[in-house]
Amino acid sequence: MSTVMAQGEVFRQPVECIVSVDDEPITDLYPYLKEVSVAMRRDTGTVGTFIFETLRDNSCGWVVQDTGGEEPLLKPWRKMKIEAKFDTGTEEVMRGYIKNVNVDYPQDMSAATVTVSVQDESILLDREHVRTSWSTTEDSRKDGDIVKEIAEGHQLTAEVKPGLDNVSLQNSTTFVKFIEERARVNGYEFYVREEILHFHPPELESEKHQATIRVYAGPTTNCLKFSARYDGHHPDEVALSRAAETGSDIEEESFAPDQVLLGKYPVSSESMGLDHFVWYQEGGNGATTEESNARAQATANSHDWKIIADGELDGVVYGHVLLNFKTVIVDGVGSTYGGVYYVDQVTHRFTPDGYRQTFRLIRNAIGDDTEAAASNNLGGLA
């Protein structure tokens, strides 16, 4: 438990990194484990990297790569899980399957290493090319129903929204690439976490945010550095031009962002006295009107993330695992850039020096309309 020290200082135990292979902690290998990093990104699967130092043993084998004998413990397709143990409890960082094992034997034998790469459970959907017809005019199906069927076929629970209705949809690649494309078309997020496949719009309306990121908050400061940039060179709308259904005229339709605002005021150039900021997008060869519209709407929403923030957390003080695809409140950076953000990327890094979490957040509004703004005092002092 945390102990209150003199002058308001709080003593916290270091965060313990727990690594399991096939649900068993790798207790004997902990002395050789020098670094664990987990990279979470919205545009790709979560990947973990483990770096071990390794030594020769008395039988001329090696203590890390030869553990397990004829069935090595560190072998591709074994299940692996990483957890962070805090004072207040244990939280999962990631789980997945070993993808690569690299052993390095340099001239200096004492510098030999074993590097293990792990990918989240989406790798199960990326093992084979599949040729199939998912939807036809006679038997049309929605994207969500198709993705749910794929998930259940790989022992994954599915959290999906219906998505587009398809009259013609074929798959000639891996399931991962197929679902990624359907997610882009619908403007959905696609990821696998804790045996659940997610296929739905960004979850921005949840009132259950992750633990607050605190900047310049005195003893409760958990953010080591924070920077934000507001990029105005993104369109406020996306337009489609296409031939009218009758005649030779060209019709145009514009799409403005329709996501929930993470703040008081939209990040639009409309109030700056400039011409309307619109970019054009091709309708797509052979795409239905509904699909073309959905792609344009998804593009408009993606361009609305005009505020990008980068920073680093002290994992011990933060006391939690920050996850992407979720919202978090930033407190202590002022009324313009403080408030709710959506987590785009997080890299978790466990080393002998401690636990750090570097992050990238995105936002589609300015103005702090959270309760944290009311107590946003310099240094966290009243």
Image (cartoon, grey):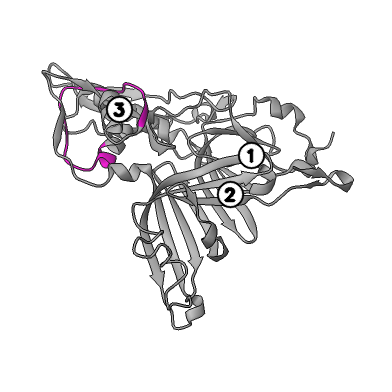
Mark sitting on residue 148: 3
Residue count near mark 2 (Cα–Cα under 10 Å), binned few <14, some 14–19, many ≥20: many
Residue furthest toward the bottom?
A: 107
Give coordinates of residue 40: x percent, y percent. 47, 46
- Number of numbered discs visible in the structure rendering: 3
The amino acid marked with disc number 2 is: Gln
Give coordinates of residue 277: x percent, y percent. 42, 32
Quick check: is 154 in the magenta stretch? no
Q: Residue at x 55, y 63 (%)?
A: 34
User: Which residue is disc 2 drawn over?
Assistant: 357
Give coordinates of residue 337: x percent, y percent. 63, 36
Q: How far apart are the two marked residues, 1 and 3, measured between alpha carbons?
A: 33 Å
Please state the extent of the stretch shown in magenta in the rendering.
Answer: 157-178
Quadrant occupied by the N terminus:
top right
Which one is earlier in the sequence, the residue at label 1 or at label 2? Answer: 1
User: Which residue is disc 1 drawn over?
Assistant: 89
Quick check: is 158 in the magenta stretch? yes
Residue count near mark 1 (Cα–Cα under 10 Å), binned few <14, some 14–19, many ≥20: few
